[in-house]
Image: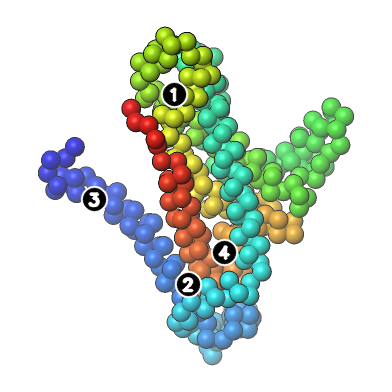
């Protein structure tokens, strides 16, 4: 598009500068911080810092000092930290369920609501509205609705003769509730990408299929879905990264419980940094999350590589 390389650089420079300042630089600082630690063992150091803060004298007054420890934080996570492995399993389960369900629901909504009539336009708006609400507000509202004693959902269950459920208070149901909230909020947003992708598919392909006697379902399976491969790839990768970095609903609704059943890695990193005062462990977890998102994104891009072009 740009014949002059200088013009391309000028137009891209603001975005690249902001990306570097607010994405690349913090990630590099986090990786560097993960190689640092306290000169004393982590548990004793945390207690010493906490005692210093409580005494109002700070860590500088004879407290532990920070030093380069190499990969010690990573070694500790992999070999002696069962909480980290538990959080990793919870994060993988959350992402493995929330991402494909969200993509499937969004794609189904796009098939149902494509068209230009007034009724479909209103339904598309209704589906998109949850994504315009802050995740924190969504979490608070769903927390009230899922209250086991006074919540709206249990009132509806009682009205139709079903027993009330503990929802967020149950280790078996809490993660499923968080997944359902994420699917409810995000499906309408990703639906808009699928609708945009459908509008880019040439109408001639459908006309040729109709002349050959293909039904609507066969047209959807053999034309729409294959030609939406690039959109599916983008939505799947973006949604997976979003789910891996989930924090607000866990912080507001469950605090990682009950019994660590919703203790995702990002929340565990937060606890390690601001409650345990172990910044080395916290940044090591953050760096591993970043690496996992990168590897999963590359794998998903490879698996969803389009086989057809138009």
C-alpha separation, residue under disc 2 versus residue under disc 3: 30 Å
Task: Let me know if residue 128 appears in the view.
Answer: no
Q: Secondary structure at mark 2?
A: helix
When asked about the image quadrant of residue 133, the answer is top right
Q: Determine which residue is flagged by label 1.
A: 223
Q: Secondary structure at mark 1?
A: helix
Kindly give the residue lying farthest to the bottom in the view shown: 62
Which quadrant of the figure contains the N terminus?
top left
Is the residue marked by circle 3 packed among few (<14), some (14-19), or many (20+) residues within 10 Å?
few
Task: Check residue 34 in the rendering and tell me which mark sits there, or answer none.
Answer: 2
Q: Earlier in the sequence, mark 4 or mark 3?
A: 3
Residue at the image position 56 percent from the left and 27 percent from the top:
108
Q: Secondary structure at mark 4?
A: helix
Q: Determine which residue is flagged by label 3.
A: 13
C-alpha separation, residue under disc 3 versus residue under disc 1: 39 Å
Location of residue 258 with respect to 161 vertically, above or below: below
C-alpha separation, residue under disc 2 versus residue under disc 4: 12 Å
The x and y percentages for residue 123 are: 55, 21
Which quadrant of the figure contains the C terminus?
top left
Q: Determine which residue is flagged by label 4.
A: 269
Q: Earlier in the sequence, mark 4 or mark 1?
A: 1
C-alpha separation, residue under disc 4 versus residue under disc 3: 33 Å
Q: Are marks 4 and 1 in contact (CB under 8 Å)?
A: no
Is the residue marked by circle 2 packed among few (<14), some (14-19), or many (20+) residues within 10 Å?
many
């Amino acid at each position: 598009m740009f014949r002059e390389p200088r013009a391309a650089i000028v137009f891209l420079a603001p975005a690249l500068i902001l990306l570097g300042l607010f994405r690349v630089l913090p990630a590099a600082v986090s990786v560097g911080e993960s190689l640092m630690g306290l000169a004393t063992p982590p548990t004793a150091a945390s207690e010493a810092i906490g005692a210093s803060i409580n005494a109002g004298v700070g860590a500088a007054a004879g407290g532990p000092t920070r030093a380069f420890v190499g990969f010690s934080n990573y070694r500790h996570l992999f070999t002696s930290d069962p909480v980290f492995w538990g959080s990793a399993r919870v994060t993988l389960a959350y992402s493995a369920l929330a991402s494909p369900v969200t993509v499937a629901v969004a794609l189904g909504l796009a098939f149902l609501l494509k068209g230009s009539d007034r009724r479909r336009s209103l339904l598309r708006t209704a589906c998109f509205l949850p994504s315009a609400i802050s995740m924190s507000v969504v979490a608070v509202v769903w927390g009230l609705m899922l209250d086991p004693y006074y919540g709206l959902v249990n009132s509806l269950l009682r009205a139709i003769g079903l027993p009330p459920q503990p929802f967020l208070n149950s280790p078996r149901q809490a993660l499923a509730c968080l997944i359902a909230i994420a699917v409810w909020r995000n499906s309408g947003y990703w639906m808009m990408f699928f609708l945009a992708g459908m509008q880019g598919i040439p109408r001639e392909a459908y006309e040729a299929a109709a002349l050959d006697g293909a039904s609507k379902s066969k047209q959807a399976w053999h034309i729409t879905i294959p030609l939406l491969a690039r959109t599916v790839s983008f939505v799947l990768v973006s949604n997976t990264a979003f789910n891996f970095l989930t924090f607000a609903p866990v912080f507001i609704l469950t605090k990682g419980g009950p019994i660590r059943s919703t203790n995702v890695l990002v929340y565990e990193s937060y606890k390690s940094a601001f409650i345990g005062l172990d910044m080395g462990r916290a940044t090591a977890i953050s760096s591993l999350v970043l690496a996992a998102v990168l590897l999963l994104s590359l794998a998903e891009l490879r698996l969803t590589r389009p086989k057809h072009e138009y």
